[in-house]
Image: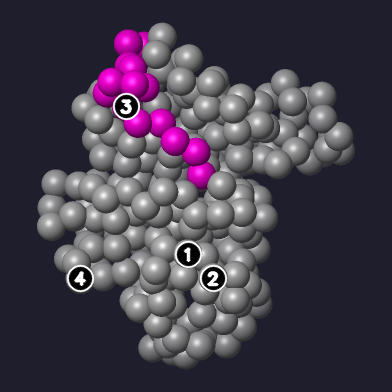
């Protein structure tokens, strides 16, 4: 009894994460065209008609672009909280009533034995959530698109076997970069995105050093470099006694291709 996880894509151009158990296959967000998601799935040998559910974190287009198309084409139920449903309705088009599934944030539910816990995060959207998934003694946490991490979020994700955590920007690169000031302010705000250092600090608090897998996600194309994100997090957590060689696996996710498939 285990879980397979793959980040099909992560970044401001589109987000889609894949989770599979022996009983269920789900996507967290579908922020590309239906066609693009079909091809990302086929790159890991999964057919789109095998997807049982799509869970949505928030209504930004890089997370919902393909949600409606996939639901209509393959008759897939969509899960989101009520505020997100209201905000994404005009973006995803008509959804069959039976495929509209509404959950309450911070209230656990189950999908074919897979425990799902949507927890509130801090972002400029209606009611954004991160997700924890439980199956047997495996726990996976997905937390991107949040401007800061409070104790409640740390408590939610603690003890995971795999973390997908946002490492959006290098603060220096963002400040010196070409974005207009209001956009820089938005990204840096508590309702924006996590920096490399924010990710590093959070990880130093929640990791245990028992072989966890850490994936850095939602990297900015303009304001980050994969090596900078990786090295910032590695150096910081190693300062706290963790070893990326020995007791933590640290990996990246990509904007334009799937990550490795992790089997937990
Ligand atoms: Zn996003
Ligand atoms: Zn967003």
Q: Nearer the viewer, residue 185 or 261?
A: 261
- Looking at the rendering, in which quadrant would you find the N terminus? bottom left
- The mark tally for this picture is 4
| Disc assigned to residue 39 | 2
Q: Position of residue 262 (x, y in %)?
A: 32, 48
What is the CA distance from the residue labelled 3 to the residue labelled 1?
A: 26 Å
* Mark 1 vs 2: CB contact within 8 A: yes
Up-down: is 228 above or below 61? above
From which residue to which does the magenta span run? Answer: 240-253
Q: Is residue 250 left or right of residue 24?
A: right
Towards the viewer: 241 or 83: 241
Q: Which residue is mark 1?
A: 43
Magenta span contains residue 249: yes
Q: Magenta residues: mostly which secondary structure?
A: loop
Dot 3 or dot 4, earlier in sequence: 4
Marks 2 and 3 in Cβ contact (< 8 Å): no
At 26% from the left and 40% from the top, the residue drawn is 161
Where in the figure is residue 26, as x and y percent of width and height?
36, 67
Of helix, strand and loop, which one carries label 2?
A: helix
- Element carrying mark 1: loop
For image coordinates 18% across by 55% down, the residue present is: 2
């Amino acid at each position: 009894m285990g879980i397979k996880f793959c980040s099909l894509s992560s970044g401001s151009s589109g987000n889609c994460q894949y989770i599979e158990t022996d009983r269920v296959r789900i996507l967290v967000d579908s922020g590309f065209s239906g066609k693009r998601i079909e091809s990302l799935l086929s790159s890991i040998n999964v057919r789109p008609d095998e997807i049982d559910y799509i869970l949505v974190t928030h209504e930004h287009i890089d997370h919902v672009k393909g949600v409606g198309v996939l639901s209509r084409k393959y008759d897939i139920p969509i899960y989101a909280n009520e505020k997100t449903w209201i905000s994404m309705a005009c973006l995803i088009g008509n959804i069959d009533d039976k495929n509209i599934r509404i959950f309450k944030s911070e209230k656990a539910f189950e999908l074919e034995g897979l425990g799902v816990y949507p927890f509130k995060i801090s972002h400029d959207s209606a009611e954004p959530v991160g997700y924890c998934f439980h199956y047997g003694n495996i726990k996976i946490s997905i937390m991107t698109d949040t401007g800061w991490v409070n104790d409640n979020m740390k408590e939610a994700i603690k003890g995971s076997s795999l973390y997908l955590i946002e490492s959006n920007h290098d603060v220096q690169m963002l400040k010196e970069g070409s974005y207009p000031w209001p956009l820089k302010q938005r990204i840096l705000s508590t309702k924006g995105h996590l920096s490399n250092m924010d990710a590093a600090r959070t990880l130093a608090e929640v990791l245990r050093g028992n072989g966890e897998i850490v994936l850095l996600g939602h990297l900015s194309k303009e304001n980050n470099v994969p090596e900078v994100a990786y090295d910032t997090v590695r150096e910081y957590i190693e300062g706290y006694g963790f070893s990326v060689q020995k007791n933590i696996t640290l990996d990246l996710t990509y904007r334009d291709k799937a990550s490795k498939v992790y089997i937990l």
